[in-house]
Image: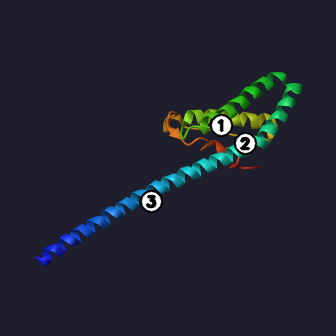
């Protein structure tokens, strides 16, 4: 009888420990996901902070020059600048965006840099459409944050 009681106590103890272990494992997994999400948000905020002040001032100075020397291009430049900031503001509220919207952002972003830097910058944007579904979801600015930062300089 004592052995049976001892065996039942061992089973109950093992079940309790197992339940606590899995409960802690679930909590650890949730914390890991939260840390990853916070990391992504911090990276995105860093990108926005990088874009906001310097990029805006450089773009406005470029726009002033375009208005004076190439008024027709100034209209297109203003539209693309608006597209870039609209994307940044809209994607702040979203965890995921389509590859298509990210590529559209990149096109506008590259255009602004090409107008500002002229022949000093050359960017090739090659995506093999057969390999990607443009409606697939990715993190905002996952591609865009690396457009200018990671490049080859000749």
The residues tagged by marks 1 and 2 sit, at their Cα atoms, a distance apart of: 9 Å
Give percent across and percent down for residue 16.
29, 65
Above-or-below relation of 69 to 11: above
Quick one: label 1 or label 2, which is nearer the N terminus? 2
Q: Position of residue 66 (x, y in %)?
A: 84, 28
Of badges 3 and 1, nearer the viewer stands: 3
Task: Label 3, secondary structure: give it.
Answer: helix
Comes first in the chain, label 3 or label 2: 3
The local crowd at label 3, few if under 14, some if 14 to 19, many if 20 or more residues have their Cα within 10 Å, is few
Q: Which quadrant of the view contains residue 95?
A: top right
Q: Of the numbered discs in the image, which one, if any, rests on residue 88?
A: 1
Helix, strand or loop at mark 1: helix
Q: Quadrant of the N terminus?
A: bottom left
Is residue 121 among the parts visible in the rendering?
no
Q: Secondary structure at mark 2?
A: helix
Q: How is the image coloured?
A: rainbow
Pointer 2: what residue? 51
- Along the horizontal axis of the image, is 27 left or right of 43? left
Q: x%, y% of residue 114?
A: 76, 36
User: What is the number of callouts on the image?
Assistant: 3
Q: Are marks 1 and 2 in contact (CB under 8 Å)?
A: yes
Q: Is residue 6 left or right of residue 83?
A: left
Q: For label 1, count other residues whose C-alpha is less than 10 Å away and answer few (under 14), some (14-19) or many (20+).
A: some
**In the picture shown, does residue 40 fall above or below 102?**
below
Where residue 28 is drawn, which disc sits there?
3
Q: In this rendering, which labeled residue sits more in front, label 3 or label 2?
A: 3
Give whichever of 18, 71 is nearer the camera. 18
Q: Is residue 143 left or right of residue 8?
A: right
Say whether residue 45 is left or right of residue 76.
left
Mark-to-mark CA distance, 3 and 1: 32 Å
């Amino acid at each position: 009888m004592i052995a049976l009681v001892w065996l039942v106590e061992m089973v109950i103890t093992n079940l309790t420990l197992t339940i606590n272990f899995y409960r802690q494992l679930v909590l650890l997994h949730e914390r890991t996901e939260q840390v990853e999400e916070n990391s992504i948000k911090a990276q995105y905020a860093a990108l926005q902070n990088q874009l906001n002040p310097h990029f805006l001032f450089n773009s406005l100075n470029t726009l002033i020059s375009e208005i004076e020397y190439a008024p027709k291009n100034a209209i297109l430049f203003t539209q693309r600048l608006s597209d870039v900031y609209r994307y940044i503001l809209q994607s702040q509220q979203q965890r995921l965006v389509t590859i298509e919207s990210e590529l559209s952002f990149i096109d506008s972003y590259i255009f602004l840099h090409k107008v500002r830097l002229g022949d000093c910058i050359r960017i090739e944007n090659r995506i093999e459409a057969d390999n990607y579904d443009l409606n697939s979801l990715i993190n905002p600015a996952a591609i865009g944050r690396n457009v200018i930062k990671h490049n080859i300089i000749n």
